[in-house]
Structures are given as C-alpha cells and as structure tokens.
Image: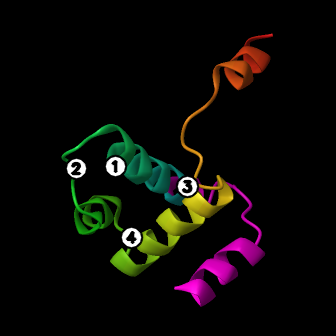
Amino acid sequence: MSKLSGDAVNRSFVVHSFNIHRFVIAGVTVASKFFNDVFYTNSRYANVSGLPLAELNQLELQFLLLNDFRLVISSAEMQRYAE
C-alpha cells in the first residue's frame, strides 16, 4: 500500500475533457462514503461509470491523497471563498 500511495502522491493530475468523468466519479464515491452510513460498493460505482474496479480504487485513493484526506471545509475557509 505504501508504494501505491507514494506513486499517487508523486504523479500530477491534470483535469481535461478526456478525464473529467474519472475525477467526478472519484469525488462522488468519496462523498457518498463520507456523508452516508450505507453506501454502494466500489464495484457498483465502477459498473455504473464504466471504469474497471482497480482504476476506480486507484482514483479514490488519489482523490483522497490530493485532498490530504481533508473532506471537511472549515468555516474560515468557506468565508474566504464567499468574499
């Protein structure tokens, strides 16, 4: 797992029209797990999105690593965006 995590951290991730759907499904998967006690499995999300399960698992991990596993926005940070 540490090698996988290291690989995900060291690679850059550029969003463009050919991969935006991957970024969105990774975000939906993480958000579903964060906000709900009962959620679909990654295999279900992979099936719906048309991505292989291994790729979705990798995308989910990379999404979390890119966000430093911080899924909550503080009030102060939210206020900065409002200004």
**Mark 1 neighbour class, 10 Å CA radius: few under 14, some 14 to 19, many 20 or more:** some
User: Residue 13 at what x, y percent from top left?
Assistant: 72, 64
Residue sitting at x 81%, y 10%: 83
Secondary element at tag 3: helix
Residue under label 3 = 23
| Residue in the foreground of this view, choosing between 30 and 24 | 30
Asked whether the residues under the numbered discs 2 and 1 touch, taking CB atoms below 8 Å apart as contact, a structural biologist would say yes
Secondary element at tag 4: loop
| Residue in the foreground of this view, choosing between 18 and 47 | 47
Give the Cα distance between marks 2 and 4. Answer: 18 Å
Give the Cα distance between marks 1 and 3. Answer: 16 Å
Residue under label 2 = 39
Residue sitting at x 48%, y 63%: 60
Span shown in magenta:
1-21
Residue under label 4 = 51
Q: Amino acid at mark 3?
A: Phe
Identify whether 35 is placed above or below 33.
above
Q: Earlier in the sequence, mark 4 or mark 3?
A: 3
Residue sitting at x 72%, y 20%: 76
Residue 40 placement, left or right of 24: left
User: Residue 63 at what x, y percent from top left?
Assistant: 57, 59
Identify whether 54 is placed above or below 80.
below
The quarter of the picture where residue 5 lies is bottom right
User: Residue 72 at what x, y percent from top left?
Assistant: 55, 36
Residue under label 1 = 33
User: Residue 77 at what x, y percent from top left?
Assistant: 72, 25
Q: Amino acid at mark 1?
A: Lys
**Mark 2 neighbour class, 10 Å CA radius: few under 14, some 14 to 19, many 20 or more:** few
**Mark 3 neighbour class, 10 Å CA radius: few under 14, some 14 to 19, many 20 or more:** some
